Image (cartoon, rainbow, N blue to C red):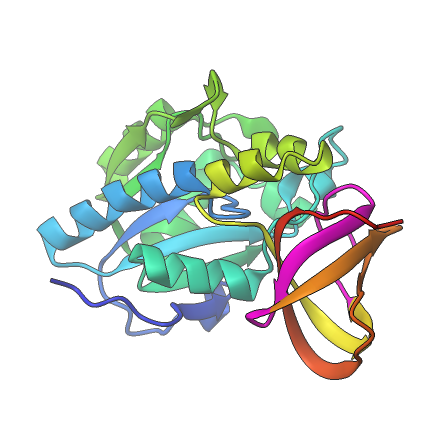
Amino acid sequence: MRSRQARATLWHGLDDVPPDLGPTVLTIGVFDGLHRGHRSLIDKARRTADERGLPLVMVTFDPHPARVLGLPKDTATLSTIAHRAELAAAAGVDAVCVLRFTRELAGLSPETFAAHCLAGRLRAKAVVVGANFTFGARAAGDVDTLRELGAALGFSVEGVPLLPANNTACSSTYTRNCLRSGDLPGVTRALGRPHRVDGVRAGDRIVLAPNTALPPPGRYRATLNGRAVLVDVRDDSVRVADGTSGEGAAAVTFLERAGGGS
């Protein structure tokens, strides 16, 4: 059985991909939060990779495409790229390629994206995507488009049905909605684990990247780098409520709402 890595190899852009990379199996998406629906997709891609004896590469985008394109969508970040790579490795991914999402990338035709990014630099022999996958300028390409292009470029394509969650698709949007409403049990069910945010501790404050997804203001039982703590969420910030201070990397995992918060 294939052993799981602590963290997948991380490539920042196509120029970071090793020039001697051999044939691969790809799975493509934003994968924010790497929820149970994402892991269902990765499971299928992993089986395909094992059948073919090829490495599995997860292709993700940063920042969120909707943020760059100005679409009216909640794009609060559920997981940092580093955490995404950690979760991907645990799910069976060998390498993560982060494509910086720009208007230039968004403007590529489906044909150019498939030929240059997938068949070219990443040497895809099989591509596994969600059934609702779209790509290329103005989302002109879908799974059928990718399958037609793949036939000419030398890779197969499989679209995987979305995993349901409470009569809707298990998605990052569903997870954010649960989090915004304070439904931490719903978040845990969607993610398959409690929600975690990563930042840097400065005294009693956890400094987070802008647009990090947080539950509503209040006090929460949580863990900080594995240690049980109480934290307060206020105005898109997190503070440790036990009177201690510290410095350095901080991973806060939200467990449940607690009494006594402001």
198 lies left or right of 16: right
Q: What stretch is highlighted in magenta?
A: 207-227
Q: Residue at x 44, y 30 (%)?
A: 133
Q: Height in image: 218 above or below 150?
A: below
Q: Which residue is drawn at 31% across and 29% down?
A: 159
Q: Which residue is drawn at 60% across and 32% down?
A: 173
Q: In which quarter of the image is the N terminus?
A: bottom left
37 lies left or right of 127: right
In the image, residue 178 lies at what x, y percent?
Answer: 63, 32
In the image, residue 130 lies at what x, y percent?
Answer: 39, 32
Q: Which residue is drawn at 55% across and 41% down?
A: 108
Q: For this rendering, which residue is in front, 182 or 237?
A: 182
In this view, the residue farthest toward the bottom is 247
Q: Does the magenta stretch include residue 83?
A: no
Dividing the picture into quadrants, the one containing residue 57 is: bottom left
In the image, residue 89 lies at what x, y percent?
Answer: 36, 63
- Residue 74 visible to an observer of this rendering: no
Q: For this rendering, which residue is in front, 37 or 46?
A: 37
In this view, the residue farthest toward the front is 259
In the image, residue 187 lies at what x, y percent?
Answer: 56, 39
